[in-house]
Image: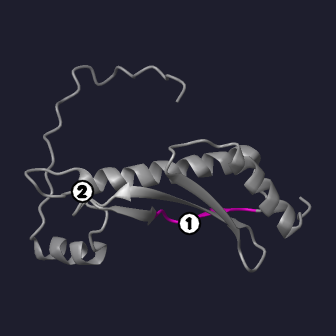
Amino acid sequence: MEKTTDKAVLNRVRALCRLITYKPDYVLSVSELSDGGGVLMQWSALVTHADDGHKIVATGRKWYVSPYAADSEILQTALMGALAMEEHECREFFKVDGQKVFNPHFDVLERVEQMKAGTVHLQTRDPKPDPKPETKLPYNGY
């Protein structure tokens, strides 16, 4: 496949992103990588801070777009970024007994140490036996 120019890729991604509409306070930015190896997309939004309720500008992670990405891949990457922002916000506000148990800001390596020390316990359910183990579910196309 022939490599397109860096500016052509950047302009194509920006043109596709201009076709996207989402929530009023959400902005999708597109920037080029300095090495010319693609572009980055990043959502930002004016959101309510989960701890004190004041408004802040939150930025999502950066999403890489290859210079060879198809238009549909570019648009789906933008969707993935919006979904990740929404999930992040949901995890910040979702509480169980007043605690943010799914907080996206947990220190993962600290959690690993807690699990090794046995201070975090996993809950599993007892699997129910399949009443007809020989029965296979029909393929539904997904």
Position of residue 55 relative to residue 74, above or below, is below
Magenta segment: 59-66
Q: Which residue is mark 1?
A: 62
Judge whether residue 64 is colored magenta: yes
Specify the quadrant that holds the N terminus.
bottom right
Give the side of residue 117 with respect to residue 66, left or right. left
Q: Residues within 10 Å of mark 1 (few under 14, many from 20)?
A: some
* Above or below, 67 relative to 128: below
Task: State yes or no: residue 63 in magenta.
Answer: yes
Q: Residues within 10 Å of mark 2 (few under 14, many from 20)?
A: some
> In the rendering, at what x and y percent does residue 86 appear?
41, 49
Look at label 2 and name its amino acid: Phe
Q: Name the outermost residue toward the right.
A: 2
Q: Report the residue at 69% width, 68% height from top.
A: 31
The residue lying at 16 percent from left, 74 percent from top is 114
| Location of residue 116 in the rendering, given as x and y in whole percent from the top left corner | 17, 75
